[in-house]
Image (cartoon, rainbow, N blue to C red):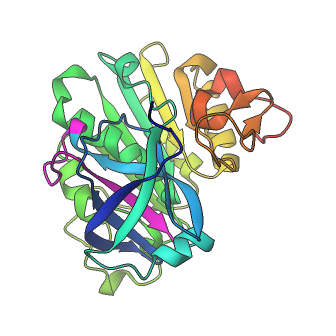
């Protein structure tokens, strides 16, 4: 029987800078790799350690740049493992275990309106959901994406916005605009039709037409942002069971054995990282 803690070797096929200190790595393994939007891998290197990283693209949901056995992670250098990885180059090897966890309930979203809300790096775990929706657009109702970041230097996947806005409504906001005139990317160019807002993600909730009885919301970002987003959506009439959030905790083993990620009796690595808001609202060691 295969040991679930045994890491698998992967080759870096491509590295793409996304934002300040953030890169997307395309990894390839000789094995078939099947995952769901919202799941994560433990990424690491012998002698350095591992870190839980959400998948930012998977072949099964329509990323045409991927081949069998390949997938993408969008990683910011913020800790020992991710800082070690930042100098890796194409052709280098690293190791992973996974995929782990419960992802976004995309099946429940079919035939319903979908509201996707992300802050900063929180767009990465939601990107496979966007790809899946675009790949099967007729299966979903109205789809809106609200995305916020500190400024354009911290915003992910801007080169995909023009493609996304053809089929879903985009609402973009930043805390500050650092230098509009030099940015080559939409939505910071005059040619982009969607415009840009300066302010909080929560400011944009009133811009979206929400039909509480038929909409489902997927929310990912800083926990304090998710708290106010979920409470704002409830004020629009949405039920807690139609709101889903993705949590971050100190996941170590990925299979609910070590207990590092326990959240009031829930194992974030196994029971999550995606939870309905009803499951996690008001738990004592969180801010939701």
Q: Is residue 171 left or right of residue 66?
A: right
Q: Please tell me which residue is depicted at 43% across the width and 24% down the height of the picture.
A: 105
Q: Is residue 147 left or right of residue 140?
A: right
Q: Looking at the image, is 75 positioned above or below residue 80?
A: above
Residue 147 at what x, y percent from top left?
44, 52
Q: Which residues are magenta?
A: 60-76
Foreground of the two, 34 or 120: 34
Residue furthest right as drawn = 284
Residue 222 at what x, y percent from top left?
63, 52
Foreground of the two, 250 or 231: 250
Residue furthest top as drawn = 213
Foreground of the two, 186 or 36: 36
Q: Please tell me which residue is depicted at 41% across the width and 44% down the height of the picture.
A: 126
Q: Looking at the image, is 120 positioned above or below residue 33?
A: below
Q: Is residue 270 left or right of residue 169?
A: right
Q: Is residue 262 left or right of residue 33?
A: right
Is residue 39 at all visible to an observer of this figure? no
Residue 28 at what x, y percent from top left?
25, 57
The quadrant where residue 134 appears: top left
Is residue 125 at all visible to an observer of this figure? yes
Q: Please tell me which residue is depicted at 58% across the width and 41% down the height of the picture.
A: 254
Foreground of the two, 142 or 116: 116
Q: Is residue 219 magenta?
A: no
The quadrant where residue 49 appears: bottom right
Q: Looking at the image, is 259 positioned above or below residue 42?
A: above
Residue 151 at what x, y percent from top left?
48, 72
Q: Quadrant of the C terminus?
A: top right
């Amino acid at each position: 029987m295969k040991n679930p803690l045994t890491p698998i070797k992967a080759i870096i096929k491509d590295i793409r800078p996304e934002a300040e200190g953030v890169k997307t790595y395309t990894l390839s393994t000789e094995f078939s790799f099947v995952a769901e939007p919202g799941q994560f891998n433990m990424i690491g290197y012998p002698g350095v350690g591992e870190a839980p990283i959400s998948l930012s693209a998977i072949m099964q949901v329509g990323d045409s740049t991927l081949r069998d056995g390949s997938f993408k992670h969008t990683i910011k250098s913020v800790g020992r493992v991710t800082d070690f990885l930042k100098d890796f180059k194409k052709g280098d090897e690293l190791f992973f275990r996974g995929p782990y966890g419960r992802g976004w309930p995309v099946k429940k979203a079919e035939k319903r309106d979908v509201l996707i809300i992300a802050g900063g790096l929180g767009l990465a775990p939601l990107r496979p959901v966007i790809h899946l929706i675009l790949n099967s657009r007729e299966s979903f109702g109205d789809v809106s994406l609200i995305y916020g970041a500190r400024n354009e230097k911290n915003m992910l996947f801007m080169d995909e916005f023009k493609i996304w806005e053809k089929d879903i409504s985009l609402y973009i906001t930043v805390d500050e605009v650092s230098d509009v005139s030099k940015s080559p990317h939409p939505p910071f160019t005059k040619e982009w039709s969607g415009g840009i807002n300066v302010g909080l993600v929560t400011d944009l909730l009133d811009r979206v037409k929400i039909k509480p009885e038929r909409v489902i919301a997927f929310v990912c970002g800083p926990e304090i942002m998710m708290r106010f987003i979920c409470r704002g959506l409830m004020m629009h009439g949405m039920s807690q069971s139609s709101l889903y959030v993705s949590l971050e905790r100190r996941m170590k083993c990925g299979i609910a054995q070590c207990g590092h990620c326990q959240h009031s009796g829930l194992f974030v690595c196994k029971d999550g990282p995606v939870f309905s808001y009803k499951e996690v609202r008001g738990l004592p060691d969180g801010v939701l």
